[in-house]
Amino acid sequence: MPAEIKTVTDIHAIGQEQWDRCAGTDNPFVSFAFLSAMEDSGSTTAQTGWQPFHLVLNDDAGQAIGIVPLYVKAHSYGEYVFDWSWAEAYERAGGKYYPKLQSAVPFSPVPGPRLLIASDHHDPDSVRRILIDGLAMLPEKLGMATLHVTFCSDGESQLMEDAGFLRRTGLQYHWCNRDYQNFDDFLGALNSRKRKNLRKERKQVLEAGYRFEALRGDDLKPHHWDRFYQFYRDTSDRKWGQAYLTREFFDLLHERIRDKTVLVAAFHDDQMVAGALNLIGTKTLYGRNWGTIDRTPLLHFETCYYQAIDIAIENGLQTVEAGAQGEHKIQRGYEPVITHSAHLIADPGLRRAVDQFLRQEQGHIAQDRDYILAEHSPYRNTGRDQ
């Protein structure tokens, strides 16, 4: 078992071989290639409020057997599991909420493992427990009020709850591939009203003169990334006011992980006017960023949702995860899925208040999911609309 558990402020201090031995290949967002591109491009730094602070567990030979992607946060931007009200309440009471610790994929609401365990280790359960204990000790050791593990797996959140963390749930909308052979096969699973609406939406976009290309690997050229970065900056400036990802990030992404990168590019009059960045995992297509300089209605749905479904079917992928929020995804075949996070809060008063809030929130989210599935599912029900 371990000789050392420590934190490092540079992913290269762990190295690609040892990191990916723990991260595996299923989810590209926790890979060395993706997270190192974040760091090396200047997207995750102390200056942007995302200082890398990864927790690593080494065995007695100095080899990493467990890793937690971890950051010191100076704010709550770029997380998608929002704790602004907690911070405001704590600071109003005289506490200091920031800096805080955050285990997450920066700027990405992508569910996946946060306790990364070496695939060949003989006792993964023990490694998980030690990593959780290591996380639990950090806030007191560093004099911080909170630590958050967001978009982790259900099993991880349960283990952390057993160790004193508070569990939180949320809702996302994912598309599930039920062995469809093509898009029309998927449409056949919808009720007639939704089926007609989707066909109408796709037809309107095509008749407006748009065409789409799913660019992957060496088909992606620097001018595509230049154009997409323009879209990304425009969207960020309008919605969030800050673009965290630098232009260099996209070059490094292309250099290190282009075989798992798909850029859906929308063209009009041979000009690229919109794009949606996706990453491909073992079983899942992950929607990453979207941007456009064209405000045409329905272009977003086609570029981000319908093209993603086409890609998933073509590649035999089981799921499309199209990002956070968006109840408009339901009528387009995306179904509600529970997401999980875990939160460690040192101050007893803040912990009690947050615990009460989360218990109520969890009940509402479960009810919302059940209601959506029962009353708003776009899929056909046996004996009803065919």
Image: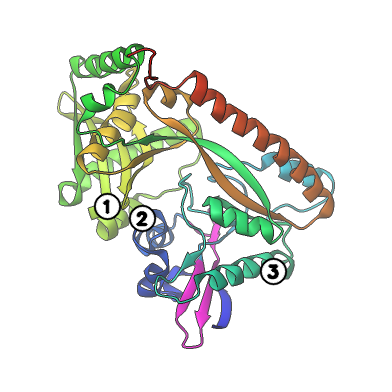
Marks 3 and 1 sit apart, C-alpha to C-alpha, by 36 Å
Q: How dense is the environment of label 1, judged by Cα within 10 Å: few (below 14), some, or many (20 and up)?
A: some
Image quarter where the N terminus lies is bottom right
Q: Is residue 55 magenta?
A: yes
* Real-space CA distance between mark 3 and mark 2, rounded to the nearest whole angstrom: 29 Å
Residue 79 shown left or right of residue 355 in the figure: left
Secondary structure state at the residue bearing disc 1: helix
Q: Residue shown at 29%/26% (left/top)?
A: 302
Q: On the rendered structure, is 134 left or right of 152?
A: right
Instruction: Provide the residue span drawn in magenta.
Output: 44-67
- Name the image quarter holding residue 119: bottom left
Residue 117 versus residue 272 in the image, above or below:
below
Q: Is residue 358 visible?
A: yes
Up/down of 362 relative to 5, above or below: above
* Amino acid type, mark 2: Pro
Q: Amino acid at mark 3?
A: Met
Tag of residue 137:
3
Q: 209 or 26, which lies in front?
A: 26
Q: Which residue has dot 1 on it?
A: 260
Crowding at mark 3 (Cα within 10 Å: few <14, some 14-19, many 20+): few
The reply to whether dot 2 and dot 1 touch (C-beta < 8 Å) is yes
Regarding mark 2 in the picture, which secondary structure is present there? helix
